[in-house]
Image: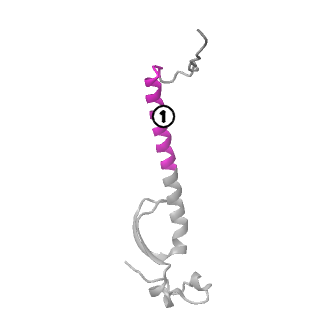
Amino acid sequence: MNNKPDPDGTCPYTGHKDLCRDHYANCPKWIQVIGHNPNTGEQMNEWACADTWLPILMIENSQMQGETGAAVESFRNEVVKVFQLALGRVPGDTSPTPKLVEGDQ
């Protein structure tokens, strides 16, 4: 595992004025990412500038949001089924629920 930056890479933290190798040891943006690449599924354990990781982390975040949305929708559908059964209706029945109205007697 190589935790040193590319010898020719410039540092975005310094406005690309300095080489990354001159600052990486004390740089707060020099981070290690361990996990799976969201594009390829390959295991990864790499060091790089946080600016380099942003596109990959944004892809991962989008994938997680999609999975969360699907899970919430599935949960919602199960809750609707339970309420329909509690009201004595057949799941999938879209007829309006009768309203109870109290009148003078």
Q: Is residue 99 above or below residue 22?
A: above
Mark 1: which secondary structure?
A: helix
Q: Position of residue 10 (x, y in %)?
A: 57, 85
- Tell me the quadrant of the picture where the N terminus can be found: bottom left
* Quarter occupied by residue 41: bottom left
**Residue 105: image location, x then y, percent:** 58, 8
Residue 21 belongs to magenta span = no
Q: Residue at x 46, y 28 (%)?
A: 83
The residue identified by callout 1 is: 77
Q: Residues within 10 Å of mark 1 (few under 14, many from 20)?
A: few
Q: Is residue 78 above or below residue 43?
A: above
Q: Main secondary structure of the magenta part?
A: helix
In the rendered structure, does residue 77 fall within the stretch colored magenta? yes
Which corner quadrant of the image does residue 78 belong to?
top left
Image height check: is 62 above or below 84?
A: below
Comparing 89 with 28, the one in front is: 89
Residue 98 place in picture, x, y as percent? 57, 18
Q: Residue at x 47, y 59 (%)?
A: 38
Left or right of residue 34: residue 99: right
Amino acid type, label 1: Asn
Q: Which residues are magenta?
A: 66-90
